[in-house]
Structures are given as C-alpha cells and as structure tokens.
Amino acid sequence: MSTEDPTKLNTTAVAAWLKDNLPGFEGPIEAEKFNVGQSNPTFRLITPGHRYVLRRKPPGVLLKSAHAVDREFRVQKALYDTDVPVAKVHVLCEDEDVIGSMFYVMDEVDGRNFNLPNLPELAVSDRWAVHDEMSRVLAAIHGVDLDAAGLSDYGPAGNYYERQIGRWTKQYRASETDTIPAMDDLIEWLNANIPADDGLRTLAHGDYRIDNLLFEKGKPNIAAVLDWELSTTGHPYADVAAVIMQWSMPAGPDTRGLAGIDRRAEGLMTDDEFVASYCKRAGIDGIDRFGFYLAFAFFRMAGIIQGVYKRALDGNASNPERAKQMGAAVPRFAEAGLKAARTV
C-alpha cells in the first residue's frame, strides 16, 4: 500500500526541478488537483506569469506498462503542429526521486470541457456540431503519417486485437478481486473471434470520448485531445467503437451515456450517424462486424475499471471514492460486451 497521498503534490520540489529544466520558468507554484480522471493524477500549476498542467504517475506499486506518462509526453510532442489538436508539452521528468514518480508538464489549454455526451449545457441546435467535430478529429488522429511524425515505432506490429486482448487479459487478471463469469465468457469469445489482420495500422488514441476533449470557447472546434495514456499504433476501429460504447451507457453523471435519450429531439447524433460521419472522413464505405469492435471496447474498459478499483483498495487511486464506486460497474461492462458479441 502506498504511503503517499496521490491527491497532494510537492510544489517545492516541482518548482526547483522546473527552475533547472524549463527555460523561462519562474515560480512560485500554486497547485490545484483536477477532480476528473482516474488514472494519472493531474494538477494545474499556477505561477505568476503562466499556467501549466502536470501529469504524474500515481505513487505506489503499479501494473506493468500502466500509467505511461512518458508515452503521453512523446505522442503529444509529435502531434503538436499537426492536424490533431494537442496541448504543447514542455518537459518530462523521469527521475522518480523528485516527487516519487515520473511526471511531465504541458501548457494549460484555455478551453471548455463537456463531461456528458448529451451536452445539456448547450442549446439543442449547437449539439450536433460537437459530435460531428468528434468524428472529424478522430479521423485526423487515424490519418496521421506515422513516419513523418516519428511514431512508426510507437507500437508493435502484428494483429492489434490479438495483442490488446492478451495485454488487457493479463492486466485484468493481475487486478482481479472477484470472479466475474461474464468477463471470463467475454475473454473467451474475443479470443475465438479475432478478425484477420487487414493491414490497417494507424495511431490509436485508446480512450477517445467527449470528456477527454477540450473545445474552444463559444465554438464546436476541439482545442486539445487529452489523456493519451492508452495510445499506440493500432487499429482505428477500436477508437470508433469506444465512442459508441460510451454512448450506449445510461445517461447521467456516473455512467455518462446516451441510453434512453431521444437523440433526434435533443439534437444529438445516433450511433449510425456518427459511424457514417467518421467513415466518410476516413474514406471508407463502412465497418464490417462492428459488434466485435464494440465487444472489444467493453472488454478493455472493464479491464481498465477493474484496475482503477484495485488501486482504490490498495490506497493509491487518484479519486478513491469514485474508483470504488466504479468497481461495481465491471460486470455491467462485461455483460454489455457479450450483448455486442451476439450482434456479429
């Protein structure tokens, strides 16, 4: 169990390190922890002349390859000044002795964040454009020239789903706290139904959803795509399915879905409209066997949530109470994955 409080930040140590490593930095620092997010603790750093954001690994014993803030730093640095909007990153600190874990610092983007995909804070007439912008930027992510961006080695070659199912099965087993029959059945089904490798290999965000995006104030344009922890070179349809997975959840602040909402009346895209909008921008006719990709998205999210729950039990979750509440959702995600599998 970690003895360090993940909600706190040693601002004195951070300021001293930035003074030596970030040109133009001037302290002192005031830190405010963002309440959103369950993986890497994130802080706003306020200085007399600038606002930054610091992302760090949680303290304590972590699952292998999890919380890869160094990968987040690398991909955002590579994407800056491309068609994919990201925050400008400045420095990566790999010396864990500074604050107890690796961290990086980037500019704070002055944008607005929507926590719910039904966009209740917007007029009905303004909502469609936000969903359409999500499809545009997702297609831009998948359209990144990996060689030109220096990301050709950002992930291994080979069948993306085979390696991802293997990876997340291991992660899930490592954080498993109770036997969940639906999760065992979903893992078995996915392994038996992996599509043949079709040669598509793009940048994949890994957790693309509306609450991981910042939008320009007063406009539907995305100002920055956030939370690149799960990004890799992989298969693009997993990201598309992740959006639909989120939307299939019940509406509300805890589940953040669109189930039960009259989307036409509320000015929101349907699942089919979002997929069609993406496909048009990606230059493809459609996505065959979409149920597999959706089942995979539910499986991976169940594995992620299980890891968050286990960290809460171990005492090093970013938001402990929320993490413990999320643990109860793992069976629901697994069952939804099996439902999606039955549509293939």
Image (cartoon, helix red, strand yellow):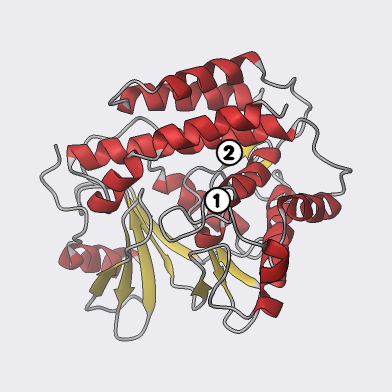
Left or right of residue 105: residue 185: right
Q: Quadrant of residue 66?
A: top left
Secondary structure under tag 1 reads helix
State the residue position of label 1: 75
Secondary structure under tag 2 reads loop
The picture places residue 310, in percent across and down from the top left corner, at 27, 35
- Seen from the viewer's position, the closer of residues 93 and 46 is 46
Which residue is painted at 42% across and 22% down in the image?
170
- Seen from the viewer's position, the closer of residues 187 and 201 is 187
Left or right of residue 298: residue 57: left
The vertical placement of 246 against 128, above or below, is: above
Q: Quadrant of residue 343?
A: top right
Left or right of residue 69: residue 143: right
Q: Earlier in the sequence, mark 2 or mark 1?
A: 1
Q: Amino acid at mark 1?
A: Val
State the residue position of label 2: 154
Report how far apart the C-alphas of labels 2 and 1 lie in the structure: 8 Å
The picture places residue 308, in percent across and down from the top left corner, at 33, 41
- Seen from the viewer's position, the closer of residues 281 and 102 is 281
Which residue is painted at 74% across and 60% down in the image?
136
Mark 2, Cα crowd under 10 Å, few <14 / some 14-19 / many 20+, is some
The picture places residue 89, in percent across and down from the top left corner, at 47, 63
Q: Amino acid at mark 2?
A: Tyr
Residue that protrudes farthest toward the left in the picture: 3
The picture places residue 138, in percent across and down from the top left corner, at 68, 54
